[in-house]
Image (cartoon, coloured by chain):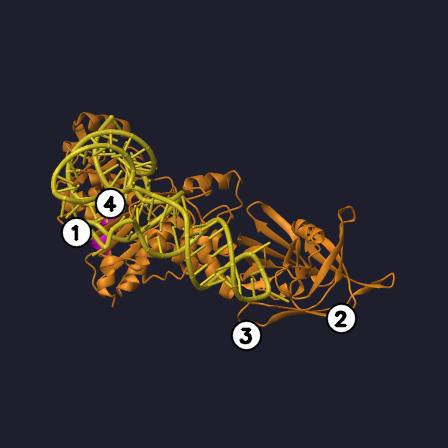
Chain colours: A orange, B yellow
Amino acid sequence: MIEEEKATKTRIGLPELPNASKGKVITRFAPAPTGALHLGQILRAAYLSWYYARRYDGKFILRIEDTDPRRIRLIYYDWIQEDLRSLGLDWDELVCESDHFEIYYELTYKLFENGKAYVCLCSSEEFKRNVARRKPCEHREKMDTVDYWENMLQCKYREGEAIVRLKTNLELENPALIDPPLLRIIETVPHPRTGYNYKIYPLYNYACIIEDHYISKITHVIRAKEHETNRVIQNFIADAFNWKLNINYIEYGMVTFEGAPAHKRHIRSALRSKEISGWEDSSLVTIRALIRRGIHPDAIKMLAEHVGMTKNDIKDMPLVTLYSFNSKVLSKIAKRIFFVEDPIVLKVYVEDDLFLARNPWIPGNEAAGYREYRLRPLTVDGKKVLNLYISREDVDLLRRAQDSKSPIRLKGLMNCRIVNIDLMNNSIYAEQLSLKPIRGVEIIHWVPAGDLAIKAFVETPSGIKEGYVEFLAQQLKNGEYVQMERYGFGRIIQNEGEVIFIAFAHK
RNA sequence: GCCCCGGUGGUGUAGUCGGCCAAGCAUUCCGGCCUCUCAAGCCGGAGAUCGCGGGUUCAAAUCCCGCCCGGGGCACCA
C-alpha cells in the first residue's frame, strides 16, 4: 500500500523486514528476569519485535530467559509482563526457558553422539591459557563421550568443576569462538520455578538457539549488536546439530540515556545502597518509572519508531525528544490544574461581592467541562479582599509588572494591578481591574487561599516540591495524567483527599 | 592485545549497488501567528560540504585505500 515512488526516495515509518511475508513472521522478546524492563530494551528489542509481528500478522513470543538462578528473581517475571502490558505490547505466547530443561538435556545427548561436545574439567584460567596457545586440553578428546555427560547429570562433579563445551576449531581467529561453554552446574542455588530439580543449566547461546530454532521457529531475531559474536556461536551450535537455520538476524546499536544508569548492575547496586527508592525511581528510565511519572505509552512508541533500528550506538541520548512526543500526546488528554509551588499570598482588593472563576479541564475539549469556583471576598477594615496563593516563582514577574504599571491576568478570574510587594510579610497587594481577559498581559495561575486549597507534593528530579493545588483536583484519580498549568506535565500518584501526591514528568 | 560493528546539522534519523542531495524528516534553539498556560497547534528562520586524508569518475554521503574516533565482544551473565 505504500506509494512505491516515494518509498524509494524517502521512507516513511519503519522499513520492511527482510524475507518477511504476511502470516509467516515469528518474533520474540527474550528478557532475563533480573530487573524491571528499561527504555533501551523496549525501544528496539521489544517494540520492534512486537511491531513487526503485528505488521505482518505474525506471532510475537515473550520468552523469559531464566537460566541463571543466581541472578533471577521471581518478582521480575511478573514485572516484565506488567511493563509490557502497560505499553500495550501484547504477546501471543509466553515461554519460560526453565520449562525446557528436559529438552536441553535430550539434545545434549545428540551433541555427544555426534562428537560435537565434551565435558571439560579445566578451570576457566586453564581453558583461556590453552585457547591462547591454541592447544587442546586433555579433556577435549578424552571426555567427548556420553558417559561424562551422564556423570554430570548424576552430579558426579561439583559446581564449577565441570562444564560442557562445544567443540569448534582451535584455529579460529576469534578466541571467543573457540569451544564455547554450553551447560554448567549450579547446585546450591534453587531456581525460583524448579527448585533443585535441575542442577545443570544451559548458558545463553545454547538455550537461545534451541529456543529460537528448535522450539519456537523464530523467523526474525531483533537484538542488540553485542550479540554479533553470539550469533556466530549459535550458528556453530546449529551446525553441530545439523540444523538448517532459517532465522534472519537484525542487530541494532546500543542506546543509553542522559543522566540515567545504563546497566542493570548499576541500578541493582544503587538499590542495595538505597541511593534510589526502587525500580520506579524517577531518576531511572525503567518503563515503570517512566509510566509512573506520566510518560504516555504512545510517546514511548513514537520514540521507538523515531529511533528505528540502526546499528549506530546512541550514547546518552537526551530525553527531550521523548518529552516532546509526550507533550503532544498529553496535551489532548491531560487534565489541567493549578499547582502553586512555594506559595505566597496575593491580597487583591476588590469591588464585587462574588467572583466566578472558570478554566477548562482540557482546552479545546468542551466535553471535558470546566473547573469552576465561587469566590467571596473577606471584609477587612471595611475593605473587600480576596486572598489567593500564588507561586513565589512569579514574584519577579509581578515586580516587573508593578514597575511597568502593566496589569496582571489571574487566569480565569480577573485582571489586577500590583500595588505593593511586601516580602517581609509574605504578602503582595493588588487591586482589582476588569474581569474580561485582556490581550498581551502576563498571565499567572493561582489557588484560592483557605478551604479551596489542597495540599500537594510534587515529586521532581530536584526533590519534592510543596504547595497547593486547586480544590477540584480532589476529583483526580490515581494514575490520571495532569498538566499543572505553566508548571509541567505529571501524573497523580496518590490522592489522599486532604493531600495529593503528583509525579512530575517534564515541562 | 585479539575479534566484530558503527561514524550524516546540538540531538535522533532518511538517503548509501554514484548524479534527482551544497542533503529530507523529527527534535532543539530563535522569530511571528493563535491562545485566558511560558503547553499544544500553525507559519517562518538558524543549524551538516555527510569522521579525516587520498584515490577512481564527467559526477561520491554513496565505490576503493589508509588513518582517526566511538561502541561492543573475548564470562561456568543474558
Q: Position of residue A440 (x, y in %)?
A: 61, 61
Assign a secondary structure to mark 2: loop
Of the image marks 1 and 3, the number of the one nearer the N terminus? 1
User: Is residue A391 positioned above or below A436 on the image?
Assistant: above
Q: Sort mark 1 into few (<14), some (14-19) or many (20+) by Cα contacts within 10 Å.
A: some
Q: Is residue A483 left or right of residue A373?
A: left
Front residue of this view, candidates A80 and A457: A457
Of all chains, the one bearing label 4 is A
Q: Mark 3 sits on what residue? A: A367
Assign a secondary structure to mark 3: helix
Res. A62 image quadrant: bottom left
Of the image marks 2 and 3, the number of the one nearer the N terminus? 2
Q: Is residue A184 left or right of residue A457?
A: left
Region in magenta: A201-215
Which residue is at the far right? Answer: A381
User: Is residue A128 positioned above or below A299 on the image?
Assistant: above
Dots 3, 4 in contact, CB < 8 A: no
Q: Position of residue A40 (x, y in %)?
A: 38, 48
Dominant secondary structure, magenta = helix
Q: Amino acid at mark 2?
A: Leu
Q: Nearer the viewer, mark 3 or mark 4?
A: 3
Q: Are marks 2 and 3 on the same chain?
A: yes
- Between marks 2 and 1, how big is the CA–CA gap? 78 Å
Q: Nearer the viewer, mark 2 or mark 3?
A: 2
Q: Amino acid at mark 1?
A: Leu
The mark total stands at 4
Q: Mark 4 sits on what residue? A: A206
Q: Nearer the viewer, mark 2 or mark 1?
A: 2
Q: Mark 1 sits on what residue? A: A245
Q: Amino acid at mark 3?
A: Ala
Front residue of this view, candidates B21 and A313: B21
User: Is residue A323 positioned above or below A357 on the image?
Assistant: above
